Amino acid sequence: MIKVAYFYTSIWYIFRVALTPLGSDTYALVVPSTHPLAHKREIQLSEFANERFISPQEDEAMYAICQNACMEAKFKPNIICTVNNSSIRLKMIEAGLGVGFFPQEDKMEYLNEKVIWLNPNPCE
């Protein structure tokens, strides 16, 4: 399970703004149902070090979340494509073109038999 807090440090530090959490997100790694690791019970994010990642575009918070999670697992993701539309990213994953991070809250919206939603442990 990957839990994330995302904010720009310099903004709150410079202005000494008090932060109040509005919520929290949990992220899943979505893989094609045919992926060799798709049905493994326990999995480490580091096992995806050689995978192709389909990521949101760099200006989206999800891009940084993907980068940070992978760096924490001691690898740099091989991002083969950035797409700003979640539905298109999911279709690319369904087609076997790569794997990608999605908010867990999106699972019911995008749930289908062609993909598996994994909750890898971030570090070994």
Image (cartoon, rainbow, N blue to C red):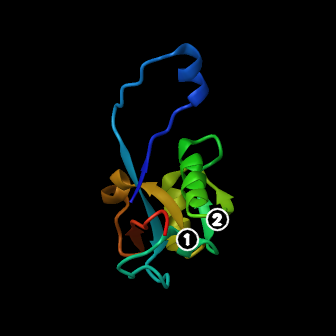
Q: Is residue 35 above or below residue 19?
A: below
Residue closest to the far top: 15
* Amino acid found under the numbered disc labelled 2: Phe
- Residue 3's label in the rendered image is none
Q: Quadrant of residue 112?
A: bottom left
Q: Secondary structure at mark 1?
A: helix
Camera-side residue of 122 and 102:
122
Total marks in image: 2
Camera-side residue of 85 and 104:
104
Q: Is residue 88 left or right of residue 107?
A: right
Quickly name the residue at label 1: 46
Camera-side residue of 40 and 30:
40
Q: Position of residue 38 (x, y in %)?
A: 43, 79
Q: Position of residue 37 (x, y in %)?
A: 47, 81
Q: Secondary structure at mark 2?
A: loop
Q: Position of residue 79 (x, y in %)?
A: 67, 62
Q: Is residue 10 left or right of residue 90?
A: right
Identify the residue at image location x=42%, y=72%: 115
Camera-side residue of 33 and 46:
46
Quickly name the residue at label 2: 75
* Amino acid found under the numbered disc labelled 1: Ser
Q: Residues within 10 Å of mark 2 (few under 14, many from 20)?
A: some
Residue 76 showing in the rendered view: yes
Identify the residue at image location x=35%, y=79%: 41
Q: Residues within 10 Å of mark 1 (few under 14, many from 20)?
A: many
Label 1 close to label 2 by CB (< 8 Å): yes
Q: Position of residue 50 (x, y in %)?
A: 64, 75
Identify the residue at image location x=49%, y=85%: 36
